[in-house]
Image: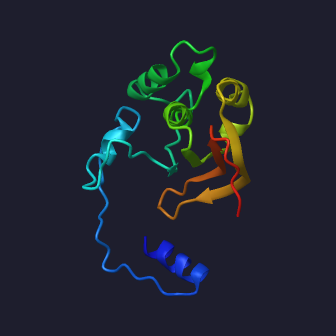
């Protein structure tokens, strides 16, 4: 919020301060694929029945299709049902599908995820993206593959992409 206030101040040539911040984060420790996302908004004191997400952004967890545990496989099966070749999808694709389901109801919502580049190569595009495209989803932007690594003792290194998608007819401009 503070960074956005600074950016608005730069746009309009005036300082806008809203400190101290009056709103605080609500942090939940549970499976985001099984939680009703709109219920999260109801914890906000300013909640109204027409409140919805404008943007969904995140970095969903990556687990390869052959490495998922039983709970993760259940999540995948709940979201994709009997879709052909769904068993070949990585766990990260569940968030894409969940966002698509949300945007079917709230078409002005936009989503962007940092994901492993497995979502845009191999057999995944046909199994994940094509059914979503057929259902009205489109990619708003994408950032080519880049290497990400952690600084932990067990160095992890993966290749990621950023994909922004929506069902909205609005054109994003900058």
Say whether residue 62 is visible: yes
Numbered marks: total: 0
Colour scheme of the rendered structure? rainbow
- For image coordinates 69% across by 24% down, the residue present is 134
Residue extending furthest toward the bottom: 14
Q: Is residue 47 above or below residue 70?
A: below
- Residue closer to the observer: 38 or 80: 38
In the image, 89: left or right of 44?
right
Q: Percent position (x, y) of residue 124?
A: 68, 29
In the image, 130: left or right of 86?
right
The quarter of the rendered structure image containing the N terminus is bottom left
Q: Percent position (x, y) of residue 151?
A: 51, 65
Q: Percent position (x, y) of residue 62?
A: 53, 41
- Residue closer to the observer: 149 or 42: 42
In the image, 31: left or right of 142?
left
- Residue closer to the observer: 28 or 21: 21
């Amino acid at each position: 919020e503070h960074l956005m206030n600074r950016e608005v101040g730069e746009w309009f040539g005036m300082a806008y301060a809203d400190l101290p911040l009056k709103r605080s984060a609500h942090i939940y420790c549970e499976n985001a694929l099984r939680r009703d996302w709109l219920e999260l908004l109801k914890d906000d004191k300013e909640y109204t029945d027409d409140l919805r997400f404008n943007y969904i952004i995140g970095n969903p967890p990556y687990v390869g299709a052959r490495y998922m545990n039983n709970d993760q496989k259940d999540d995948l099966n709940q979201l994709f049902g009997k879709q052909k070749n769904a068993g070949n999808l990585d766990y990260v694709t569940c968030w894409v599908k969940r966002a698509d389901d949300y945007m079917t109801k709230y078409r002005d919502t936009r989503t962007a995820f940092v994901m492993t580049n497995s979502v845009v190569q191999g057999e995944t595009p046909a199994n994940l993206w094509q059914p979503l495209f057929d259902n009205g989803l489109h990619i708003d932007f994408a950032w080519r593959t880049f290497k990400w690594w952690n600084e932990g003792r067990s160095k992890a290194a993966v290749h990621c992409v950023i994909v922004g998608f929506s069902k909205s007819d609005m054109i994003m401009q900058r």
